Amino acid sequence: MAEPRLRTVEKREPPYRFNHFPSDFPFKLGRELVYHLATSTPALEGTQWEAIFAKTIGAQWQPSNVGLDDIVLANCAWGAKTVKASSPPTAQKVRLISGRNAPVYSFGTNNVKSLDKQELGKQILSIYNNRVWAVRAKYEHLRTIVLIKSEDLLEVAVFEFETVAYNEKEYTWSWNKNENLQGCTKDGTHCFTWQPHGAQFTIIEKVPKERLAIRIKQPGPLPENFVLKQVGFDKSWVQVI
Protein backbone atom coordinates (compact mmCIF):
# COMPACT_ATOMS: atom_id res chain seq x y z
CA MET A 1 0.00 0.00 0.00
CA ALA A 2 1.32 3.47 -0.89
CA GLU A 3 1.97 5.88 1.96
CA PRO A 4 -0.76 8.53 2.29
CA ARG A 5 0.07 12.19 1.85
CA LEU A 6 -0.35 14.01 5.16
CA ARG A 7 -0.60 17.75 5.79
CA THR A 8 1.06 17.61 9.21
CA VAL A 9 3.97 15.36 8.30
CA GLU A 10 6.36 15.93 5.40
CA LYS A 11 9.03 13.28 4.95
CA ARG A 12 12.34 14.32 3.53
CA GLU A 13 13.51 12.39 0.51
CA PRO A 14 15.92 9.48 1.15
CA PRO A 15 19.50 9.65 -0.21
CA TYR A 16 18.38 7.71 -3.29
CA ARG A 17 15.43 5.62 -4.50
CA PHE A 18 15.27 1.93 -3.62
CA ASN A 19 17.92 -0.05 -5.51
CA HIS A 20 18.94 2.97 -7.58
CA PHE A 21 22.42 3.12 -6.11
CA PRO A 22 24.81 6.01 -6.84
CA SER A 23 26.35 5.71 -10.31
CA ASP A 24 29.84 4.96 -8.95
CA PHE A 25 28.59 2.39 -6.43
CA PRO A 26 29.29 -0.72 -8.59
CA PHE A 27 32.90 0.35 -9.16
CA LYS A 28 33.46 1.22 -5.50
CA LEU A 29 31.95 -2.05 -4.37
CA GLY A 30 34.03 -4.05 -6.83
CA ARG A 31 37.18 -2.27 -5.68
CA GLU A 32 36.44 -3.09 -2.04
CA LEU A 33 35.81 -6.75 -2.87
CA VAL A 34 39.05 -7.02 -4.86
CA TYR A 35 40.96 -5.47 -1.95
CA HIS A 36 39.29 -7.89 0.45
CA LEU A 37 40.26 -10.88 -1.68
CA ALA A 38 43.83 -9.61 -2.06
CA THR A 39 44.31 -9.25 1.68
CA SER A 40 42.06 -11.92 3.17
CA THR A 41 40.03 -15.04 2.43
CA PRO A 42 36.78 -15.10 0.41
CA ALA A 43 34.83 -15.25 3.67
CA LEU A 44 33.11 -11.92 4.21
CA GLU A 45 31.06 -11.53 7.36
CA GLY A 46 28.17 -9.25 8.19
CA THR A 47 30.17 -6.59 10.02
CA GLN A 48 32.62 -6.40 7.11
CA TRP A 49 29.74 -5.90 4.69
CA GLU A 50 28.32 -3.17 6.92
CA ALA A 51 31.64 -1.31 6.82
CA ILE A 52 32.04 -1.77 3.06
CA PHE A 53 28.52 -0.56 2.25
CA ALA A 54 28.87 2.46 4.54
CA LYS A 55 32.15 3.40 2.89
CA THR A 56 30.85 3.04 -0.67
CA ILE A 57 27.87 5.38 -0.15
CA GLY A 58 29.64 7.83 2.17
CA ALA A 59 27.59 6.87 5.24
CA GLN A 60 28.52 6.43 8.89
CA TRP A 61 29.10 2.91 10.17
CA GLN A 62 27.91 2.59 13.75
CA PRO A 63 27.27 -1.04 14.77
CA SER A 64 24.23 -1.36 17.01
CA ASN A 65 22.92 -4.08 19.30
CA VAL A 66 19.62 -4.25 17.44
CA GLY A 67 21.26 -4.69 14.03
CA LEU A 68 18.67 -2.66 12.13
CA ASP A 69 20.47 0.68 11.96
CA ASP A 70 24.19 -0.10 11.66
CA ILE A 71 24.64 2.31 8.75
CA VAL A 72 23.36 5.89 8.79
CA LEU A 73 23.27 8.56 6.10
CA ALA A 74 21.29 11.71 6.81
CA ASN A 75 17.67 10.66 7.51
CA CYS A 76 18.13 7.03 6.38
CA ALA A 77 19.42 3.98 8.22
CA TRP A 78 20.24 0.47 7.05
CA GLY A 79 20.67 -2.94 8.57
CA ALA A 80 22.99 -5.21 6.56
CA LYS A 81 22.76 -8.92 5.74
CA THR A 82 24.94 -11.37 3.81
CA VAL A 83 23.84 -14.70 2.35
CA LYS A 84 25.50 -17.26 0.09
CA ALA A 85 24.11 -18.51 -3.22
CA SER A 86 25.50 -20.68 -5.99
CA SER A 87 24.53 -18.01 -8.54
CA PRO A 88 23.97 -14.58 -6.92
CA PRO A 89 22.81 -12.84 -10.15
CA THR A 90 19.94 -15.30 -10.61
CA ALA A 91 18.89 -15.91 -6.99
CA GLN A 92 15.13 -15.55 -6.53
CA LYS A 93 14.76 -15.78 -2.76
CA VAL A 94 17.06 -15.43 0.24
CA ARG A 95 16.78 -16.46 3.87
CA LEU A 96 17.87 -13.65 6.15
CA ILE A 97 18.76 -14.34 9.77
CA SER A 98 17.10 -11.48 11.63
CA GLY A 99 18.07 -11.87 15.26
CA ARG A 100 16.97 -14.00 18.16
CA ASN A 101 13.35 -13.72 19.24
CA ALA A 102 12.96 -15.45 22.58
CA PRO A 103 9.39 -15.65 23.95
CA VAL A 104 10.83 -17.23 27.09
CA TYR A 105 12.67 -13.98 27.84
CA SER A 106 10.23 -11.46 26.36
CA PHE A 107 6.93 -12.96 27.49
CA GLY A 108 7.90 -15.42 30.22
CA THR A 109 6.73 -18.34 28.09
CA ASN A 110 8.08 -21.39 29.93
CA ASN A 111 7.26 -24.12 27.40
CA VAL A 112 6.90 -22.91 23.82
CA LYS A 113 5.68 -26.30 22.59
CA SER A 114 2.74 -26.20 25.02
CA LEU A 115 1.62 -22.80 23.73
CA ASP A 116 -0.89 -22.49 20.88
CA LYS A 117 1.21 -22.20 17.73
CA GLN A 118 -0.72 -19.17 16.48
CA GLU A 119 -0.16 -17.36 19.76
CA LEU A 120 3.52 -18.33 19.75
CA GLY A 121 3.89 -16.99 16.20
CA LYS A 122 2.30 -13.69 17.22
CA GLN A 123 4.75 -13.40 20.12
CA ILE A 124 7.73 -14.03 17.83
CA LEU A 125 6.59 -11.42 15.31
CA SER A 126 5.78 -8.99 18.11
CA ILE A 127 9.37 -9.13 19.37
CA TYR A 128 10.70 -8.34 15.90
CA ASN A 129 8.09 -5.65 15.28
CA ASN A 130 8.91 -3.81 18.48
CA ARG A 131 12.57 -3.63 17.46
CA VAL A 132 11.55 -2.18 14.10
CA TRP A 133 9.19 0.38 15.66
CA ALA A 134 11.88 1.52 18.10
CA VAL A 135 14.37 2.16 15.29
CA ARG A 136 11.83 3.70 12.89
CA ALA A 137 11.03 6.25 15.59
CA LYS A 138 14.56 7.63 15.09
CA TYR A 139 14.78 7.65 11.29
CA GLU A 140 12.46 8.75 8.50
CA HIS A 141 13.67 5.91 6.26
CA LEU A 142 14.75 2.43 7.33
CA ARG A 143 16.11 -0.17 4.92
CA THR A 144 17.86 -3.53 4.81
CA ILE A 145 20.79 -3.91 2.42
CA VAL A 146 21.56 -7.48 1.33
CA LEU A 147 24.73 -8.90 -0.23
CA ILE A 148 24.23 -12.22 -2.00
CA LYS A 149 27.69 -13.72 -2.47
CA SER A 150 29.21 -16.69 -4.26
CA GLU A 151 31.52 -19.06 -2.41
CA ASP A 152 34.61 -17.45 -4.00
CA LEU A 153 33.19 -13.89 -3.74
CA LEU A 154 33.79 -13.29 -7.45
CA GLU A 155 30.07 -12.82 -8.13
CA VAL A 156 27.73 -10.82 -5.92
CA ALA A 157 24.28 -9.31 -6.10
CA VAL A 158 23.06 -6.40 -3.98
CA PHE A 159 19.52 -5.27 -3.23
CA GLU A 160 17.64 -3.43 -0.53
CA PHE A 161 14.12 -3.31 0.79
CA GLU A 162 12.18 -1.30 3.32
CA THR A 163 12.45 -2.63 6.86
CA VAL A 164 8.88 -2.90 8.10
CA ALA A 165 6.84 -4.39 10.91
CA TYR A 166 4.55 -7.26 9.93
CA ASN A 167 0.82 -7.54 10.55
CA GLU A 168 0.57 -10.42 13.01
CA LYS A 169 -2.96 -11.30 11.82
CA GLU A 170 -1.88 -12.04 8.25
CA TYR A 171 0.14 -15.18 8.99
CA THR A 172 -0.57 -18.73 10.06
CA TRP A 173 1.96 -20.84 11.94
CA SER A 174 2.79 -24.54 11.97
CA TRP A 175 5.58 -26.85 13.15
CA ASN A 176 7.62 -28.41 10.33
CA LYS A 177 9.35 -31.80 10.25
CA ASN A 178 12.50 -30.25 11.76
CA GLU A 179 10.48 -29.03 14.75
CA ASN A 180 10.87 -25.40 13.66
CA LEU A 181 7.94 -23.01 13.58
CA GLN A 182 7.02 -21.69 10.13
CA GLY A 183 4.96 -18.59 9.37
CA CYS A 184 3.06 -18.45 6.09
CA THR A 185 0.63 -16.08 4.42
CA LYS A 186 -2.99 -17.16 3.96
CA ASP A 187 -2.13 -18.49 0.47
CA GLY A 188 0.64 -20.69 1.87
CA THR A 189 3.68 -18.59 0.97
CA HIS A 190 6.49 -19.37 3.42
CA CYS A 191 7.70 -16.11 5.01
CA PHE A 192 9.31 -16.87 8.40
CA THR A 193 11.11 -19.66 10.23
CA TRP A 194 11.75 -19.71 13.96
CA GLN A 195 14.00 -22.22 15.69
CA PRO A 196 13.06 -22.98 19.30
CA HIS A 197 16.63 -24.05 20.08
CA GLY A 198 18.48 -20.73 20.06
CA ALA A 199 15.38 -18.68 19.15
CA GLN A 200 16.82 -17.76 15.73
CA PHE A 201 14.33 -15.89 13.53
CA THR A 202 14.65 -16.03 9.73
CA ILE A 203 12.81 -13.91 7.17
CA ILE A 204 12.42 -15.17 3.59
CA GLU A 205 12.70 -12.28 1.15
CA LYS A 206 12.15 -12.18 -2.61
CA VAL A 207 15.02 -10.73 -4.64
CA PRO A 208 13.74 -7.83 -6.78
CA LYS A 209 14.47 -7.47 -10.48
CA GLU A 210 16.27 -4.19 -9.72
CA ARG A 211 19.13 -5.98 -7.99
CA LEU A 212 22.68 -4.96 -8.82
CA ALA A 213 24.86 -7.88 -9.93
CA ILE A 214 28.60 -7.62 -10.56
CA ARG A 215 31.47 -9.97 -11.34
CA ILE A 216 35.06 -9.22 -10.39
CA LYS A 217 38.45 -10.61 -11.37
CA GLN A 218 40.34 -12.79 -8.91
CA PRO A 219 43.38 -10.79 -7.75
CA GLY A 220 46.72 -12.57 -7.61
CA PRO A 221 48.44 -13.23 -4.27
CA LEU A 222 50.52 -10.40 -2.87
CA PRO A 223 54.26 -11.27 -2.81
CA GLU A 224 55.51 -11.83 0.72
CA ASN A 225 58.47 -9.46 0.40
CA PHE A 226 56.22 -6.72 -1.02
CA VAL A 227 53.83 -6.93 1.93
CA LEU A 228 56.61 -6.94 4.52
CA LYS A 229 58.26 -3.94 2.85
CA GLN A 230 54.99 -2.02 2.74
CA VAL A 231 54.42 -2.45 6.47
CA GLY A 232 58.04 -1.56 7.27
CA PHE A 233 58.97 -4.93 8.76
CA ASP A 234 62.43 -5.48 10.22
CA LYS A 235 64.03 -7.87 12.72
CA SER A 236 63.10 -5.63 15.67
CA TRP A 237 59.47 -6.68 15.22
CA VAL A 238 60.32 -10.18 16.52
CA GLN A 239 61.19 -10.62 20.18
CA VAL A 240 62.10 -13.92 21.79
CA ILE A 241 60.50 -14.05 25.25
Image (cartoon, rainbow, N blue to C red):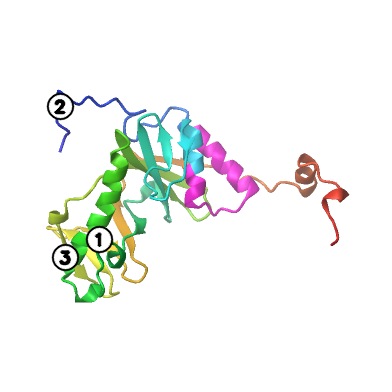
Q: Secondary structure at mark 1?
A: helix
Residue in view at x 23 percent, y 57 percent: 125
Q: Which residue is mark 3?
A: 119
Residue 146: in sight, yes or no? no
Q: Secondary structure at mark 2?
A: loop
Q: Position of residue 136 (x, y in %)?
A: 29, 40
| Left or right: where 240 falls relative to 163 | right
- For the record, the magenta segment spans 26-50
Q: Position of residue 120 (x, y in %)?
A: 20, 66
In front of the other: 70 or 24: 70
Name the amino acid, label 2: Arg
Residue in view at x 15 percent, y 27 percent: 5
Q: Is residue 128 magenta?
A: no
Mark 3 neighbour class, 10 Å CA radius: few under 14, some 14 to 19, many 20 or more: few
CA separation, marks 1 and 2?
Answer: 32 Å
Mark 1 neighbour class, 10 Å CA radius: few under 14, some 14 to 19, many 20 or more: many
**Total marks in image:** 3
- Mark positioned earlier in the residue sequence (1 or 2): 2
Name the amino acid, label 3: Glu
Q: Which residue is mark 1?
A: 124
Name the amino acid, label 1: Ile
Residue 74: in sight, yes or no? yes
Q: Is residue 36 magenta?
A: yes
- Please tell me whether residue 214 is drawn above or below residue 174 in the rendered image: above
**Among all residues in the image, which is located at the extreme front?**
108
CA separation, marks 3 and 2?
Answer: 35 Å
- Please tell me whether residue 96 is drawn above or below residue 36 in the rendered image: below
Residue in view at x 76 percent, y 42 percent: 231
- Mark positioned earlier in the residue sequence (3 or 2): 2
Q: Which residue is mark 2?
A: 5
Main SS, magenta residues: helix
